[in-house]
Amino acid sequence: MKTYIIQAIRLTVVLTILLCVIYPVVISFAGKLSKGHGDGETIVVNGKVVGYANVGQSFTKPQYFWGRPSAVGYNAAGSAGSNKGPTNPDYLKDVGKRIDTLLKYHAYLKRSDIPSEMVTASGSGLDPDISAKSAEIQVKRIAQYRKLDEKKVAQLVADHTEGPLLGLFGPSKVNVLKLNVALDQLK
Amino acid sequence: MNTELFGIIATFAITLLIAIPLGKYLAKMFAGEKVWTDFLKPVEKGLFKLAGINPNEPMNWKQFLKAMMTINILWLIYGFFELIYQDKLPLNPDGNPGMTADLAFNTIISFVANCNLQDYSGETGASYLTQHFIFMFLHFTSAATGIACGVAVFKAFRDKTTTELGNFWNFFVKAITRLLLPFAIVISLILTFNGTPASYAGKDQFMSLQGDTVHMSRGPAAQMIAIKHLGTNGGGWFGANSAHPLENPNYLTNMTEIIAQFIIPVAMILAFGYFIRRKKLSWVIFNVMMLGVMMLMIPSISSELGGNPLIAKMGVTQATGAMEGKEVRFGPTATAYWSTLTTVTSTGSVNGMHDSFMPLTGLWQLLAMMVNGFFGGCGVGLLNYYIYLIIAVFISGLMVGRTPEFLGHKVEAREVKIAALITLLSPFLIMAGTALSSYILVAHANADWAVKPSAWLNNPSYHGFSEMLYQYASSNANNGSGFEGLGDNNIFWNVSAGLVIFFGRFLPIIGPIAIAGLLAQKKYIPESAGTLKVDTLTFGIMTFAVIVVLNALSYFPALALGPLAEYFSMH
């Protein structure tokens, strides 16, 4: 028994050096070669960081494309979904309110035009994407607020729609932050 | 829609393409035959020398278990104190506090046991030191422990009569150097180059496009996320686990992570056949398990794609299916696919929030964890299945009126007793836990704990009951996913789930190894015309029937009160 205890302690120390120091430090150095230098990829506008490319942020102003509802208000110091069950009456009320808000800002929409992802909270609370359909329904509102040609805004959405992986695997999507950065540059 | 389906088919195909040769490799490697990774021998030699271990020293089943338990208990003690004092230790750039004693108790058991139920949130509850030196360390070592125990069972059935199960340290270290670490390096590089942070930089702050101040949690996550999947661990860096856009940035990383968590459980089954030179047996087991997985997966995908009927009533379109708790970049198909594989294996990482899935998907998730033998965790999946096999052999023996035999060894009262006790352990832990928590919820709703029982449940009615049932099912299966709405960071849940995890981990390892050790000592009986053949379709079906009957009898009442009642209430 005593030999096992000593062997266990020594093995734990040796493996700690291998697995918790050497391995992560090597990967961390390799990560310096990646796009975000291993710190996470940022988006820079006029020399200032405005966000992380993969992480959603809150857009509530009418001149921007909106992302999905977030259970944590896009607070990236944490992350969480709503964890509301599908039959929870309070949750269903929240969904109803979100539909009403969307209809208020987009008087031209019918209920059936609204994709469900725009009224349901994402898993992380930081979902950076919406579907192309969800961006399209906002085009008219944004064109009106920004006094832009609707076609131009619609074209912007089309340009920012990312297809499936290799054109074959997974859903297509629109990164809301990247779309809005491009929108600000649109004349 | 179709591209989503192609996505999971491709993912599944790649999994098999990797797992099948990997199984062959593992069998050879653990048997000590020549393999291409033998260039790592000097590294292992160095490790053994520094640790003062002779890897060739034989162990019988009792010695094997003693060595295994010694090092696991060492990690429990060391990790407990490190978690409590993490605020006073280095590498804590975000200044996170130390854990309370009950939270540290739950957390350390959970990680030692390969469960990774997390009652804390990574961003605010752990330092970079504990994330790496405890969580990531245990991601490697708990998986290697499971694999080593699996290999001991392999060993027992290869040799006709033996008392030696091999050397625990040898299997354990080789599982790390020849399997987990090399794969972890490749996977963490894929993640890093797709946007997962890998540096030690602390929280970032910036002004968002519309002018809000945002604090962004980061850290060396890629290294840990790679092994969290590979070792069927599941404990993530960020609170939202693999739904977090830095933990799982795009569809490619999603494919990588879901492949990573399934290859070793599949490969271990095939390795069993190669190792004991009965390939047909492992293919029969593989097919029974795959049948089980498909029966859980196909209805899950279908119910998520169908969307929430109560939201459909509000008039919005659910063209992409049920989206609450899911991420657009994965879509419901890949999220449902993931939810099945993460619950049949003991991974428990999530890329969508299980609490918000449709009631029937919740049912399949629960059932996957209750069965806990369709591939299962690294190494231990086979041990769980092996208990079902012994029960099936016993029942078949009774049916044909012969002494039951398994691979040339008589299965007698002592072995069947152990198997029966292990089989009964799961329903006991899950049901007793859920009953106790339900009682406290009703009778002591205002107990003065960190979270009052009246505030435990995030959802009312049947779904609230499912949250409690899920917590214990997940703990017992060492799965670690949760219906995360449950307010579980308080003394009741931390302690009760911690105990369930502990017993749910170690008894189902000790039991099968004891049975294997006992059987291997017995005289070998050569196959004859009267031998029950275990590598046939008939016996495969028999085992499947045993699994279905045992689990239906154990869990149907509880499932009826939770997910089934919720399903019928919404239709």
Image: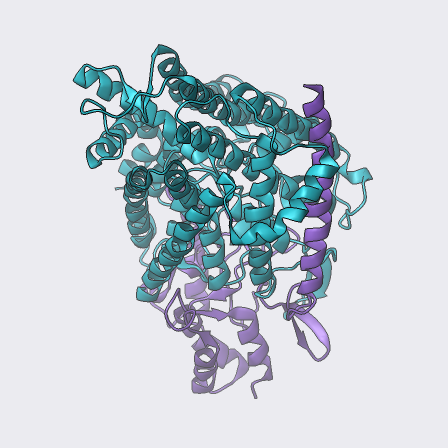
Chain colours: A purple, B cyan
Q: Quadrant of the N terminus of chain B?
A: bottom left
- Residue B440 position, x and y percent, is 51, 19
- Residue A48 position, x and y percent, is 72, 74
Q: Is residue A56 visible?
A: no
- Residue B116 position, x and y percent, is 56, 37
Q: Nearer the viewer, residue B193 or B203?
A: B193
Please give the count of numbered marks on the rendered protein. 0
- Note whether B332 is above or below B97 in the view shown: below
Q: Nearer the viewer, residue B94 or B131?
A: B131
- Residue B141 position, x and y percent, is 60, 38
Image quarter for residue A98? Answer: bottom left
Image quarter for residue B136? Answer: top right
Q: Nearer the viewer, residue B88 or A1?
A: A1
- Note whether B471 is above or below B121 in the view shown: above
Q: Quadrant of the C terminus of chain B?
A: top left
- Note whether A166 is above or below B356 in the view shown: below
> Which residue is situated farthest in the top direction here?
B413
Q: Residue at x 25, y 19 (%)?
A: B395
Q: Is residue A185 left or right of residue B335?
A: right
Q: Residue at x 78, y 47 (%)?
A: B91
- Note whether B323 is above or below B53 in the view shown: below
Q: Residue at x 34, y 13 (%)?
A: B412
Q: Is residue B185 visible?
A: yes
Q: Residue at x 32, y 60 (%)?
A: B5
Q: Nearer the viewer, residue A95 or B286?
A: B286
